[in-house]
Image (cartoon, grey):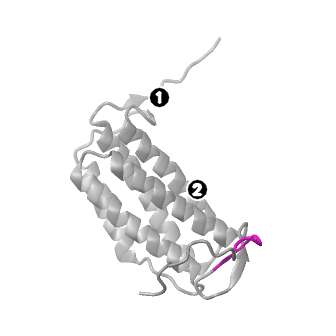
Amino acid sequence: MGHRLSKIVTRTGDDGTTGLSDGSRLRKDDALIEAIGTVDELNSVIGFAESQQSLAHVRAALVLIQHDLFDLGGALSLPGHAVLTEAHIEALDATVTEWNANLPPLKEFILPGGSPAVAAMHVARTVCRRAERRLLSLDDARTANGRVYLNRLSDLLFVGARLAAEGQERSWKPRRFS
């Protein structure tokens, strides 16, 4: 493994730049840094969502996903390096299929929330969609599998929220004012 962080306060970012794994530096508002930061944020909210879940298999899947997201962030930080493969995407698809197998079909939109476990999954889902948009804005070949992975991950988080609701989903009812 590479460098261990023995010194956290380096002051190197005081000038508004941050370092990539290859030693280059970019402004902290660069689109690439925004994408890396949003993937990091997603990893954090998935960690929070995992802490709220009662189903062991859901918790275990979310931890594996956190490892994938750490890999994705690292790959983004190293120009020319991609890490997520079709196998990662297929694993997400298999998990969504498994989780969705016993859920009733949706007949209407559902409202996010109802319990901390459900709400946390929906927050993770929306941050995941933002991370996907950030990768898309890079228009970079090395982000292609990352974009697909995040698209499928948002589906997984939606289905995970449905599992966490334990049949107590709240349906959206349009309010009409006359």
- The residue beneath circle 2 is 130
**Quarter of the figure with residue 176:** top right
Residue type pointed to by label 1: Trp
Decide which of tag 2 and tag 1 comes sooner along the chain: 2
* Residue nearest the observer in this picture, 92 or 32: 32
Instruction: State whether residue 89 is above or below residue 97.
Output: below
Name the quadrant of the C terminus.
top right
* Residue nearest the observer in this picture, 100 or 105: 100
User: Residue placed at 42% from the left, 59% from the top?
Assistant: 153
**Quarter of the figure with residue 61:** bottom left
Residue 24, percent from left and from top: 68, 86
User: Residue placed at 26% from the left, 45% from the top?
Assistant: 54
User: Is the C-beta separation of discs 2 and 1 under 8 Å?
Assistant: no
> Seen in the image, is 138 located left or right of residue 125?
right
Cα separation between marks 2 and 1: 23 Å
Residue 13, percent from left and from top: 70, 73
Residue type pointed to by label 2: Arg
Residue 129, percent from left and from top: 54, 55
Q: Secondary structure at mark 1?
A: loop
Q: Which residues are magenta?
A: 13-19
User: Residue placed at 37% from the left, 44% from the top?
Assistant: 161
- The residue beneath circle 1 is 172
**Residue 87 at least partly seen:** yes
Q: Residues within 10 Å of mark 1 (few under 14, many from 20)?
A: few
Q: Residue furthest top?
A: 178
Instruction: State whether residue 55 is above or below residue 64.
Output: above
> Seen in the image, is 173 located left or right of residue 51?
right
* Residue nearest the observer in this picture, 60 or 134: 60
